[in-house]
Image: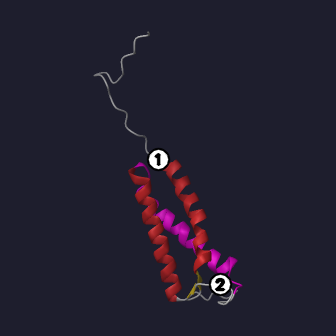
Amino acid sequence: MEWDLGFLGLATLLGMALGFGLLAQLFAGKATSRRLWLIASGVYFVAGLLISEVWFGWATEKDLQPNIDGLSFDEALLSLIPGIAAVIITRRLTRRPTRRVRVGGDGFEPPTPAL
């Protein structure tokens, strides 16, 4: 197997991964881990590298367009699927409980009378 990914292709994939991670952290908010961006970026980068270089590594530049310095750009976008799955799993595993609003001094809401 020959890896033909150049510096520009690697930088493009890294930029895409960081952008995905930051958007994931932005949409998830403070209800999840502070390192969600790092997890999402890592999964996106590794998945994009595997998809571009292993799964579609057999194809030539004529077969795959656009090709950015060895990176199969359109095929690397398929890494959104495992990236989104990683975000959902991480959010469900690390979601912090939400605060409940206290109504009375003892913390319990008085029962409503039956009609």
Could you tell which of marks 1 and 2 lies nearer the N-terminus? 2
The image shows residue 37 at horizontal and vertical percentages of: 45, 63
User: Horizontally, is 44 left or right of 103 in the view?
Assistant: right
Tell me if residue 81 comes above or below residue 54 in the rendering: above
Query: Which segment is the magenta one?
Result: 31-59
Q: Residue at x 52, y 68 (%)?
A: 42
The residue type indicated by label 1 comes to Arg
Tell me if residue 18 comes above or below residue 106 in the rendering: below
Residue 18 forms part of the magenta stretch = no
Magenta-colored segment: predominant secondary structure: helix
Residue 40 appears in the rendering: yes
Tell me if residue 61 comes above or below residue 79 in the rendering: below
What label sits on residue 64 in the rendered view? 2
Q: Are marks 1 and 2 in contact (CB under 8 Å)?
A: no
Of residues 41 and 16, which is closer to you in this image?
A: 16
Q: Mark 1 points at which residue?
A: 95
Q: Dot 2: few (<14), some (14–19), or many (≥20) neighbours within 10 Å?
A: some
Q: Dot 1: few (<14), some (14–19), or many (≥20) neighbours within 10 Å?
A: some
Q: What element carries label 1?
A: loop
Q: Which residue is drawn at 67% across and 79% down?
A: 54
